[in-house]
Amino acid sequence: MSITYGALGGLVVEIVVFYGRIAAWQAARHRALSRNRRRTQLPRLDKYIDPPSDALAALTRVSLGAGAGWIFSPQLTGALATVAVGASAPALLRQLGSARTLQAAIGQSPPAPAEPGSGDPSSPGRPEVLES
């Protein structure tokens, strides 16, 4: 059930994005009508909506939401929490991707693992000594 709720969260995000495009088209039509009364110069809907790319983006968001719902299902206790995780899945991945980019831009690399026998008791290669 968590996969379904996660996918629903992804779908909610896509509906909000789609509404934003329709609202932008509507605003552009209103601006054009206020400037002149000829309907031949109104913006076309296909300048705001591209069905193939929008459908692919919707499928991707729904899939990411379903995957996030499945991955986090042991930690989620309710349907609303699962929908929220599904809705945030694309943003979470985008944030994780930008964190790596930021780390590379700063020039930092992840810390290297400790070498055996370097003095770190948790390092591999050094036997653990228990004192009694």
Image: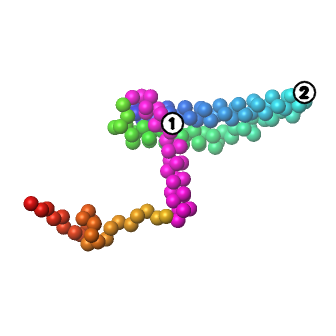
Q: Which mark is residue 33?
A: none
Q: Across the whole image, how many numbered discs are drawn on residues?
A: 2
Residue drawn at (59%, 32%) of the image: 15
Residue type, numbered disc 2: Arg
Would residue 18 be found to the left or right of residue 126 on screen?
Answer: right
**Pointer 1 with pointer 2, Cβ within 8 A:** no
Q: Which residues are magenta?
A: 78-107
Would residue 41 be found to the left or right of residue 81 on screen?
Answer: right
Helix, strand or loop for disc 2: loop
Q: Is residue 130 visible?
A: yes
Q: Residues within 10 Å of mark 1 (few under 14, many from 20)?
A: many
Helix, strand or loop for disc 1: helix
Residue drawn at (51%, 57%) of the image: 100
**Residue furthest to the left:** 132
Q: Residues within 10 Å of mark 2 (few under 14, many from 20)?
A: few
Residue drawn at (28%, 66%) of the image: 120
Q: What secondary structure is the stretch in magenta mostly built from?
A: helix
Quadrant in which the C terminus appears: bottom left
Q: Which mark is residue 87?
A: 1
Question: Which residue corresponds to mark 2?
Answer: 37
Residue 100: say if magenta.
yes
Q: Is residue 100 above or below residue 33?
A: below
Would residue 78 be found to the left or right of residue 93 on screen?
Answer: left
Q: Position of residue 44 (x, y in %)?
A: 78, 35
Q: Position of residue 54 (x, y in %)?
A: 63, 40
Residue type, numbered disc 1: Ala
